[in-house]
Amino acid sequence: MPDALNSLDMVPVVDLGGRPLTPCSPEKAEQNLRDGLATMADGVLRLNYRPLAYRRIYRMVRDRDGLTCAWCHGVGSTLDHVLPICWGGRTALNNCVMACRACNHARNNALPSHFLQWTGFRPEHPVIRYVLEHEDELLVRAEQSLRQRPIATCLSKEEAQIWVACHHGQWADARPAPPAKPFSRFRPDQPFREVFVP
């Protein structure tokens, strides 16, 4: 660990625009540096991605979709990436929908086509329908985009970690194989209808 980090209780953190974020521990700062997610300058950890923009997208999706899960039509409180981040999906209006925690968790990074096979859901949300109709093409374009765009376009730590893995030849290891069945920590007897409001 760099000596500058050893002497700090908490490390100041800023985003790409220089806006202050919640300070982190020296260990977390070192991990971010090691993972290529940040740089250190003048004792301040400078993130290479834009986490505050994620909140803006969340609000825009919530305003568009309301608090309704796009998958099961229950109460939706989470932002769900229709094409998952680990497959190159981005945090953008044309890839995000509101989802209940049960559906978001149960998908477990599965592609939308797999999730619908498991559940039998027939979502009418235009974002989901578009991604389903063009899933193979979007997967190819997502990988190409991930390889070409800068890390500064990432809007979350998870997105930045996938970007780093892709640019260091480790994307295959970071991208999970599609699960064989859905997983839920909510109600095993009815895993997709559970409503959970934070």
Image: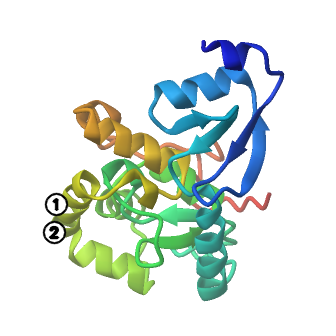
Task: Name the one closer to the observer, 18 or 192.
Answer: 18
Most extreme residue toward the front is: 42
Figure coloring: rainbow
Query: Left or right: where does residue 82 sit relative to residue 20?
Result: left
Say which mark, if any, is on residue 110. Answer: none
Mark 2, Cα crowd under 10 Å, few <14 / some 14-19 / many 20+, is few
Q: Secondary structure at mark 1?
A: helix
The residue type indicated by label 2 comes to Glu
Residue pointed to by mark 2: 137
Q: Amino acid at mark 1?
A: Val
Q: Position of residue 145 (x, y in %)?
A: 25, 61
Is residue 158 positioned above or below 19 on the image? Answer: above
Residue in view at x 47 percent, y 65 percent = 91
Residue for point 65% across, 61% down: 52
* Residue shown at the point (28%, 41%) measured from the top left: 166
Q: Residues within 10 Å of mark 1 (few under 14, many from 20)?
A: few
Does 91 sit above or below residue 170? below
Specify whether 33 is left or right of 100: left
- Residue 7: x %, y % from top left: 78, 15
Tell me whether the residue at label 1 lies in contact with that at label 2, contact meaning CB atoms closer than 8 angstroms: yes
Real-space Cα distance between discs 1 and 2?
5 Å
Numbered badge on residue 140: 1
Q: Position of residue 158 (x, y in %)?
A: 49, 45
Query: From the viewer's perspective, is 53 left or right of 174?
Result: right
Q: Relative to the observer, which residue lies in front, 137 or 120?
A: 137
